Image (cartoon, rainbow, N blue to C red):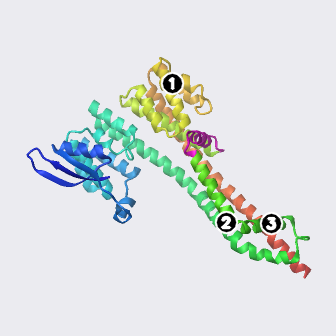
Amino acid sequence: MEFTYKAKSSIGEIFEGTIDASNESAAVTILHGKGWTVFSLNPVKRNLFSIDLNEYLQRPGSKDVVMFTRQLSTLIDADMPLAEGLRTLSIQMEKPSFKKMILNIAESVESGSSLSGALANYPRLFSPFYIRLVQSGEISGKLHNSLNYLAEYLEKSQAISSKLKGALAYPVFVLFALVVVTFIMVIYVLPQLLTIFKDVGNVDLPLTTRVLIFAIDFINNNLAFLVVGFLLLVFGIVAYLRTPAGRVWYDKAKVRMPSLGIVVRNLYLARIAESLTTLIGAGISILDALQITADLVGNISYRNIIIDAQANVRNGGTISEIFSQHKEEIPPLFTSMTAIGEKTGKLDGMLQHVAKFYKSESDNAIDSISQLIEPVMVVLLGFGVAVLVSSILLPIYSLVGAG
């Protein structure tokens, strides 16, 4: 967000201008860091014509965060001062909004803020997991190591996400094309062809042809109602999924889907194991690590399990005790490895092995699904062609032969 400000410096000089910050509090912090007294601060009001579309379309994403993290780690390892390193990185960034963001972070650091505190002003890009790891690096004096951890973690997560999207890209495209072709056939093509059979009558026509004639007539005669009904159905589903009960149902459904549910479950398990490994290895307490992982996992069912585990640990119990009560979400292998890690005092090492295992399982499952989807799509397309042939072409041949 942009804010207009009026402030006075320590020597009495008055400044007016604009500042970009995530919120009003962050803007005040940046200005106070310069030793200025803020007289007024107001958000810049924008209308449709004042929006910078280029800046909006080039908003930073996960790839930019990975690159920023890796490069900042390298500069810190080279003993470059933090603020100077941030300003150097801002020059290299191509996206204007990200460049401006890094400059604001640099100004906050120069004004006395910690790096984690400055990054916390941009929660859309930097998650609590990211912030806490940076904070642990600042406290331990190993910021370079923490940033390396983060870069590797983000790169691995991004690679898995890209692989899953790549596996689903082909079937989604084919399904979209099938829906478009079906819509065109139902609205424009089939009604013209089926008029031939209406003149003949439905008595001698195959059952599939009569069913198709009824369906096409019903759709075309009630198209407006069907479209409105479909939109209302979609709106109702979306509204339900935004409710607490709807989110719980959706998160459970993702894990229970045939074939794809195994992939989703393994991805969640790998995320939980790797997050805990990274946080514990960085020196963060087990209670804080569980809280951060619960906020990061992205599934309400797993979040509730981790929160229960946190409460159990706080009361003197173990994580594995809670995991063993949720065998559908947490497999016995995960629970057993966690229990061994707790008993031996090497929880982070055990969870690292668990993370590798479930990542490997996810990769294999994604490959197998992409191979399975292609024949399934071929069967669906073949079924559609068979219905059209039996409903239209065969009756046409019959009419031509009878004539």
As helix, strand or loop, the secondary structure at mark 2 comes to: helix
- Residue topped by disc 3: 214
- Residue topped by disc 2: 224
- Residue topped by disc 1: 319
Q: Position of residue 78 (x, y in %)?
A: 23, 43
Q: What are the residue bounds of the magenta stretch?
A: 241-258
Query: Could you give the CA–CA distance between mark 2 and mark 3, rounded to whole angstroms?
Result: 17 Å
Q: Which amino acid does label 1 sit on?
A: Ile
Q: Nearer the viewer, residue 157 or 322?
A: 322
Q: In which quarter of the image is the C terminus?
A: bottom right
Q: Is residue 193 magenta?
A: no
Q: Which amino acid does label 3 sit on?
A: Phe
Q: Which residue lies furthest to the bottom in this view?
A: 403
As helix, strand or loop, the secondary structure at mark 3 comes to: helix
Q: In this view, does 177 lie above or below 374?
A: below
- Give the overall secondary structure of the magenta segment: helix
Q: Which amino acid does label 2 sit on?
A: Ala
